[in-house]
Image (cartoon, rainbow, N blue to C red):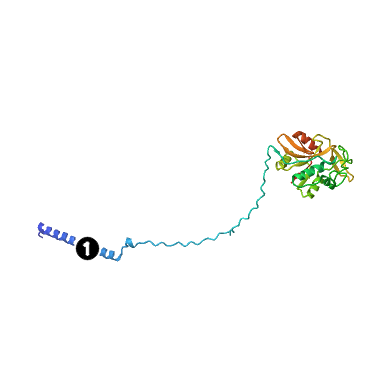
Amino acid sequence: MQPVPNSHYKKWIVILVILIMIGFTTLFIMVNRTLQAEEQLVTPLSTTSMTATAIPATITPIPPTATVTPVTPTPTAILPTITTVVIPESYYIMDITGTGQYFALGCEASAAVDWANYFGVFIYEYNFQTELPISDNPDLGFVGLVTGPWGQVPPYAYGVHADPVAALLRKYGLPAISGKGYTLDQVREKLAQSKPIIAWVIGNMVGGIPSEYVDKQGNVTIVAAYEHVVILTGYDQDSIRYMNNGRFYEVPNEVFLNSWGVLGNMAVMAE
């Protein structure tokens, strides 16, 4: 067998390479066509057509477990305003006048009509005296004869205490109140309101000795010799001014309190 010449061998190699290249080219063309066909089946989304549509969320309210009923506020009652009375350091009632008592033991009637006159009510002293109730107890009425000697104690001629005097003043339409145990501050407060005070003291503001007295019904009261009444008309920090039978006097607080205290700080005041 004769050997194949080299030229013939090279020819077949060239032919084989060409065939391989043709095969690869054909395969590439077929694959490319297949891909194009697949791309035509897929329609790309335009970015301009991708408009997002908001989907409204449906919110279902969850009912509370407990029902709350609104409460209408109830108006709160307004409490009365408590006004603190400011007591000035001094005060004097200047437009009060008086006269001397007519009867020996008529100081209560005399002071009462002067006090009433200050508030615009005129009363005759005699009428006031005779209209007072009569009793053997000064807390209930006038004790003894109004013309009797001064300085005695019941059951002898004596006088009358605050309650019957205030009661008779009220019958004349005056706002009179009576009592015992008043304080110096209460006196100042009333005087600062231009309200004079009838006060039960001893003599012309002197000391005295209280004593118990039992009336016919067994009632016990405190009495003192030389019981007397004056009208308080002013004060300052150290003293009290008062009117006694139309005349004005001024004494230190200690002197006034000592005399006023014998019968228990008894007085008639205006409401």
Please name the residue that numbered disc 1 is placed on. 29
Number of marks in the image? Answer: 1
The quarter holding residue 244 reads top right
Residue 74 coordinates in the image, percent (x, y): 63, 55
Is residue 220 visible to us here?
A: yes
The local secondary structure at tag 1 comes to helix
Q: Is residue 238 left or right of residue 125?
A: left
Above/below status of 34 relative to 205:
below
| Observer-nearest of 30 and 127 | 127
* The N terminus lies in quadrant: bottom left
Q: Is residue 76 left or right of residue 166?
A: left
Which residue is located at x 82 percent, y 39 percent?
Answer: 228
Is residue 5 visible to us here?
A: no
Above/below status of 47 relative to 174:
below
Amino acid under disc 1: Ile
Residue 157 coordinates in the image, percent (x, y): 88, 41
Mark 1 is surrounded, within 10 Å at the Cα level, by few (under 14), some (14 to 19) or many (20 or more) other residues, namely few
Q: Is residue 40 left or right of residue 215?
A: left
| Observer-nearest of 161 and 38 | 161
Residue 217 coordinates in the image, percent (x, y): 89, 46
Residue 229 coordinates in the image, percent (x, y): 80, 40
Which residue is located at x 81 percent, y 42 percent?
Answer: 110
